[in-house]
Image (tube, helix red, strand yellow):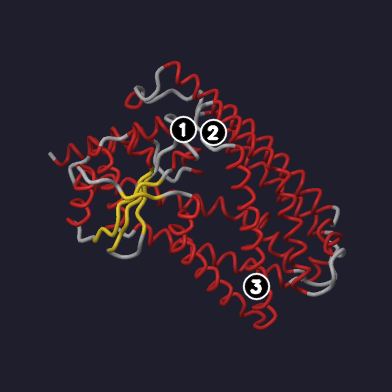
């Protein structure tokens, strides 16, 4: 019984934390706007922004509540064990049954995602996906997440049965390799869903190539991705390992920013590259994977835990569900507190790098335009920034960029 009570208490803590984050996000609609970002939205747009934010926050509260209720019902009624008992015996099929139920119940929260994308984002003019693209994306995501979850859980079960306590090391290793594979595959995966075309010859192409080669990088390709098919929001990134890079620009970015502003964005990205920030980030995520592996080990050590939720012996699927919905959910806010603080420092440093390349002015105007098109928050409350912002608030970033430009003079 004690594990069940703990599960409910932890689910309540996780739900309360989500409410706190949403409440803090809502507070920024009442926070005064700093002077150096006051020109981003005119009065009418700002009012629209506040309405947009409030609608999103209301939806988040409803969605978190629905998720909380579903989880409490699943855990208190031994639903996972009952569902698994409908399937034949055998470790693989039993763990699959639990994962299947978990993924199926995730469908219950789909109406919220639908409402967010097709109603709220649509109403404020961001959404570009049709209902057809939306459902196709959701089905793909459903199959992929069930597949990945099954594969990971199956590997966990093999390692645990073969190695016993040594599974900690082996499973942590598997998770770290998986992260590397995802990092490696991400550029390939985005090719399945989007069209890429080479950037046409001209000023932008020449400037970007010059900027990269100056720092010893080899430019493999500069491509434009049709991000506008899904959203009006703009983005850009580097792909590839080591010194050989390809650049991906969203078509939306090219529409909105001048060539100099795009170069400023890439000078910032280059700053991350020169300081190996992505590598540090990856090492930090390895730490997270080790924690996950230790938690998996702790969960699997206690057979009475499984009995309290209606199972006869260990069910690896249930162990993973516990791990993800409760244990890891409790731990990750602590992790993000540190990871985000580190990331914000890296952002400042990358901005300073762009300034040293002579792009300070253009970076400020690029960041302002990006905030405008992303409908970003210009006046977040400090606690909100500390808890969940991977980037510093725009106003403080501009201050820091201006200071760096002063110093350079
Ligand atoms: Zn950055």
Gap in angstroms between the C-alphas marked 2 and 3: 37 Å
x and y percent of residue 346 in the render? 35, 51
Tell me the element at label 1: loop
Residue at 40% from the left image edge and 39% from the top image edge: 234
**Does 58 sit above or below residue 277?**
above
Q: How dense is the environment of label 2, judged by Cα within 10 Å: few (below 14), some, or many (20 and up)?
A: many
Tell me, for residue 156, which label it has, or none. 3
Q: Is mark 3 within 8 Å of ligand 1?
A: no
> Which is in the foreground here, disc 1 or disc 3?
3
Say which element carries label 2. helix
In three-dimensional space, the C-alpha distance between marks 1 and 2, rounded to whole angstroms, equals 7 Å
Residue placed most toward the observer, 37 or 150: 150
- Number of residue marks: 3
* Picture disc at residue 380: 1
Which corner quadrant holds the C terminus? top left
Horizontal side, residue 290 vs residue 63: left or right: left
- Please state the horizontal and vertical placement of residue 147, each as a whole percent of the image: 64, 63
**Is 195 situated left or right of 130 in this image?**
left
Identify residue for label 2.
Answer: 25
Farthest residue, direction left = 409
Mark 1–mark 2 contact, CB under 8 Å?
yes
Q: Earlier in the sequence, mark 2 or mark 3?
A: 2
Give the vertical position of 409 relative to 326 (above or below): above
């Amino acid at each position: 019984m004690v594990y069940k009570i703990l599960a409910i208490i932890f689910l309540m803590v996780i739900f309360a934390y989500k409410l706190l984050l949403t409440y803090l996000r809502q507070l920024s609609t009442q926070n005064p706007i700093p002077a150096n970002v006051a020109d981003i939205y005119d009065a009418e747009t700002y009012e629209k922004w506040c309405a947009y934010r409030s609608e999103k926050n209301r939806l988040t509260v409803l969605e978190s509540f629905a998720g909380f209720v579903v989880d409490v019902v699943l855990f208190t009624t031994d639903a996972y064990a009952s569902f698994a008992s409908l399937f034949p015996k055998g470790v693989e099929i039993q763990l699959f049954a639990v994962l299947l139920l978990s993924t199926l119940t995730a469908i219950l929260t789909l109406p919220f995602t639908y409402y967010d994308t097709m109603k709220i984002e649509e109403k404020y003019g961001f959404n570009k996906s049709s209902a057809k693209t939306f459902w196709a994306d959701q089905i793909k995501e459903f199959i992929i997440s069930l597949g990945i979850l099954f594969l990971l859980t199956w590997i966990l079960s093999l390692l645990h049965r073969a190695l016993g306590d040594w599974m900690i090391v082996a499973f942590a290793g598997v998770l770290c390799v998986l992260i590397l594979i995802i990092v490696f595959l991400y550029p390939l995966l985005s090719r399945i869903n989007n069209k890429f075309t080479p950037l046409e010859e001209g000023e932008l192409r020449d400037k970007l190539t010059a900027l990269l080669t100056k720092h010893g990088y080899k430019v493999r390709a500069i491509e434009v991705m049709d991000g506008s098919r899904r959203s009006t929001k703009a983005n850009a990134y580097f792909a590839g390992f080591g010194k050989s890079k390809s650049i991906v620009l969203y078509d939306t970015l090219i529409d909105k920013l001048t060539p100099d502003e795009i170069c400023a964005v890439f000078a910032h990205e280059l700053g991350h590259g020169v300081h190996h920030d992505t590598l540090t980030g990856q090492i930090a995520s390895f730490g997270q994977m080790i924690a996950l592996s230790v938690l998996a080990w702790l969960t699997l050590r206690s057979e009475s835990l499984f009995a309290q939720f209606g199972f006869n012996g260990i069910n690896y699927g249930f162990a993973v569900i516990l791990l993800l919905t409760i244990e890891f959910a409790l731990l990750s806010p602590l992790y993000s507190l540190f990871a985000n603080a580190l990331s914000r420092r890296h952002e400042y440093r990358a901005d300073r790098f762009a300034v040293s390349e002579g792009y300070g002015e253009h970076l400020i105007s690029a960041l302002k335009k990006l905030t405008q098109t992303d409908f970003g928050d210009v006046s977040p409350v400090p606690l909100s920034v500390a808890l969940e912002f991977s980037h510093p608030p725009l106003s403080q970033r501009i201050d820091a960029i201006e200071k760096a430009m002063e110093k350079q003079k």
